[in-house]
Amino acid sequence: MRISKQTKKTTLAQQGRYLLICLLSMLLLFLAGSVLILNRTQQQVYEQLEEISKLYTDELDHRFFRISRNLFSTVMDSSNPDSAFWKYMDLMEKDQYEEYVIT
Protein backbone atom coordinates (compact mmCIF):
# COMPACT_ATOMS: atom_id res chain seq x y z
CA MET A 1 0.00 0.00 0.00
CA ARG A 2 1.47 3.13 -1.22
CA ILE A 3 -0.01 6.52 -0.51
CA SER A 4 0.68 8.90 -3.30
CA LYS A 5 1.40 12.45 -2.45
CA GLN A 6 0.01 14.82 -4.97
CA THR A 7 0.61 18.09 -3.18
CA LYS A 8 1.85 21.15 -4.92
CA LYS A 9 5.13 22.18 -3.50
CA THR A 10 5.91 25.86 -3.17
CA THR A 11 9.23 27.43 -2.57
CA LEU A 12 10.09 29.47 0.48
CA ALA A 13 10.13 32.66 -1.60
CA GLN A 14 6.57 32.04 -2.82
CA GLN A 15 5.37 31.33 0.70
CA GLY A 16 7.06 34.55 1.83
CA ARG A 17 5.25 36.51 -0.89
CA TYR A 18 1.88 35.01 0.08
CA LEU A 19 2.55 35.81 3.71
CA LEU A 20 3.62 39.37 2.86
CA ILE A 21 0.50 39.94 0.72
CA CYS A 22 -1.69 38.56 3.50
CA LEU A 23 -0.03 40.74 6.14
CA LEU A 24 -0.22 43.88 3.99
CA SER A 25 -3.90 43.33 3.25
CA MET A 26 -4.59 42.83 6.96
CA LEU A 27 -2.60 45.98 7.78
CA LEU A 28 -4.59 48.00 5.24
CA LEU A 29 -7.83 46.61 6.61
CA PHE A 30 -6.86 47.54 10.18
CA LEU A 31 -5.74 51.02 9.11
CA ALA A 32 -9.02 51.64 7.28
CA GLY A 33 -10.99 50.46 10.31
CA SER A 34 -8.94 52.68 12.63
CA VAL A 35 -9.48 55.71 10.43
CA LEU A 36 -13.22 55.08 10.34
CA ILE A 37 -13.39 54.64 14.11
CA LEU A 38 -11.36 57.79 14.77
CA ASN A 39 -13.49 59.80 12.35
CA ARG A 40 -16.73 58.64 14.01
CA THR A 41 -15.34 59.33 17.48
CA GLN A 42 -14.31 62.83 16.43
CA GLN A 43 -17.83 63.52 15.11
CA GLN A 44 -19.36 62.32 18.37
CA VAL A 45 -17.03 64.53 20.41
CA TYR A 46 -17.97 67.58 18.32
CA GLU A 47 -21.68 66.80 18.70
CA GLN A 48 -21.30 66.45 22.48
CA LEU A 49 -19.36 69.71 22.73
CA GLU A 50 -22.02 71.47 20.68
CA GLU A 51 -24.80 70.16 22.93
CA ILE A 52 -22.93 71.08 26.12
CA SER A 53 -22.20 74.60 24.89
CA LYS A 54 -25.85 75.06 23.88
CA LEU A 55 -27.02 73.89 27.32
CA TYR A 56 -24.54 76.21 29.01
CA THR A 57 -25.58 79.26 26.99
CA ASP A 58 -29.26 78.48 27.56
CA GLU A 59 -28.65 78.26 31.31
CA LEU A 60 -26.77 81.57 31.24
CA ASP A 61 -29.63 83.18 29.31
CA HIS A 62 -32.14 81.91 31.89
CA ARG A 63 -30.02 83.17 34.79
CA PHE A 64 -29.59 86.62 33.24
CA PHE A 65 -33.31 86.77 32.53
CA ARG A 66 -34.10 85.94 36.16
CA ILE A 67 -31.58 88.52 37.38
CA SER A 68 -32.97 91.24 35.11
CA ARG A 69 -36.54 90.37 36.09
CA ASN A 70 -35.60 90.52 39.77
CA LEU A 71 -33.82 93.85 39.30
CA PHE A 72 -36.75 95.27 37.39
CA SER A 73 -39.23 94.18 40.02
CA THR A 74 -37.00 95.62 42.75
CA VAL A 75 -36.58 98.94 40.95
CA MET A 76 -40.24 99.22 40.03
CA ASP A 77 -41.44 98.33 43.52
CA SER A 78 -43.91 101.12 44.26
CA SER A 79 -44.39 100.01 47.86
CA ASN A 80 -40.99 101.52 48.67
CA PRO A 81 -41.31 105.24 47.87
CA ASP A 82 -37.93 105.98 49.44
CA SER A 83 -36.05 104.20 46.69
CA ALA A 84 -33.68 106.25 44.56
CA PHE A 85 -35.53 105.30 41.40
CA TRP A 86 -38.81 106.83 42.58
CA LYS A 87 -36.99 109.97 43.78
CA TYR A 88 -35.50 110.40 40.30
CA MET A 89 -38.90 109.75 38.74
CA ASP A 90 -40.47 112.47 40.92
CA LEU A 91 -37.75 114.91 39.90
CA MET A 92 -38.31 114.11 36.23
CA GLU A 93 -42.07 114.54 36.57
CA LYS A 94 -41.55 117.98 38.10
CA ASP A 95 -39.25 118.95 35.20
CA GLN A 96 -36.29 119.38 37.50
CA TYR A 97 -33.83 117.76 35.16
CA GLU A 98 -30.90 119.78 36.52
CA GLU A 99 -31.20 118.19 39.93
CA TYR A 100 -31.68 114.80 38.33
CA VAL A 101 -28.49 115.15 36.35
CA ILE A 102 -26.53 116.45 39.33
CA THR A 103 -27.88 113.71 41.55
Image: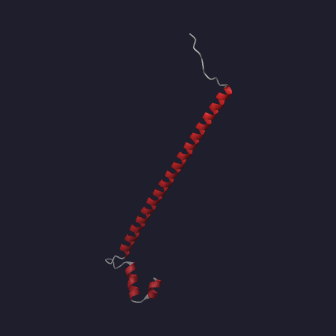
Residue 44 shown left or right of residue 19 in the figure:
left
Question: Which residue is pictured at 57% across the width and 40% down the height?
Answer: 29
Q: Is residue 35 left or right of residue 101?
A: right
Front position in the image: 33 or 100: 33
**Image x and y of residue 41, in percent:** 51, 48
> In the displayed structure, would residue 73 be above or below residue 51?
below
State the quadrant of the N terminus. Answer: top right
Question: In the image as oriented, which residue stretches furthest toward the right?
Answer: 13
Left-right relation of 19 to 92? right
In terms of depth relative to the viewer, which is nearer, 101 or 38? 38
Front-lying residue, 19 or 82: 19
Q: Quadrant of residue 26?
A: top right
Percent coordinates x, y for residue 62 in the rendering: 40, 65
Vertical placement of residue 83 versus 39, above or below: below
Residue 60 location in percent, x, y?
44, 63
Q: Quadrant of the C terminus?
A: bottom left
Q: Position of residue 33 (x, y in %)?
A: 55, 43
**Residue most extreme to the top:** 1
Name the residue nearer the viewer: 22 or 3: 3
Give the residue at x 43% y 62%.
Answer: 58
Q: Is residue 10 above or below residue 60?
A: above
User: Residue farthest to the left?
Assistant: 79
